[in-house]
Image (tube, rainbow, N blue to C red):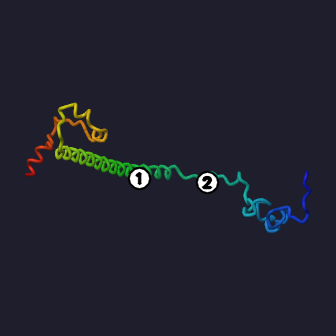
Amino acid sequence: HPRARNPARPRWPCAWPPNAFSHAVGASMGKVRSWKSAATVKGSASTVGPAAHTSWAKRSQERAERAVAQAAQREVDEQIRQQKKLAQERREEKEKRKEENKAKGLQYQVISDSRKLKKMSRKQLKLIRKADTTGPKPLLAAESKKRRK
């Protein structure tokens, strides 16, 4: 090793050297995990024996109770699903009515001369919209001015 160790400098960054684990001897798992207690029972001995098994009647009763609880939960889930579906339908109908009412109150001006379109700027062209005139007839801009007077 190119660098010799300084004997004045401690070898370990912690407050004690690694062999001074007097508080952990016997009571813990070892030198490394001092917070763990030593195993009192062998791992294979801690498995569940036949005495811990529940009887068939008790298991079938628990299964029946679980089936009843699951059926009740399914009913509740179905009710919630129905409520959400109804709310969604109401929202869609409301949106549809809103669009129809917007179309009814719309004012527009028919551009029959296509040369006007060619003269328009980009900003004006962005404002232009093709509309279906077969549905509810919105007011023409000229008609709305007549009504105001």
Dot 2 or dot 1: first in sequence order is 2
Element at badge 1? helix
Query: 10 Å neighbourhood of mark 1: few (<14), some, or many (≥20)?
Result: few
Element at badge 2? helix
Give the x, y percent position of residue 135. 16, 37
Left or right for 26, reference 54? right
Q: Residue furthest top?
A: 114
Q: Residue at image x 30%, y 40%?
A: 126
Front in this rendered view, residue 63 or 29: 29
| Pointer 2 with pointer 1, Cβ within 8 A | no
> In front: mark 2 or mark 1?
1
Q: Residue at image x 50%, y 53%?
A: 58
**Which label number is shown at residue 51?**
2
Front in this rendered view, residue 133 or 6: 133
**Which label number is shown at residue 60?**
none
Left or right for 131, reference 12? left
Q: Residue at image x 91%, y 51%?
A: 2
The amino acid type found where label 1 is placed reads: Ala
Give the x, y percent position of residue 46. 68, 54
Which residue is tagged 1? 69
Give the x, y percent position of residue 83. 30, 50
Query: Residue 27, located in which quarter of the rendered image?
Result: bottom right
Query: 10 Å neighbourhood of mark 2: few (<14), some, or many (≥20)?
Result: few
The amino acid type found where label 2 is placed reads: Ala
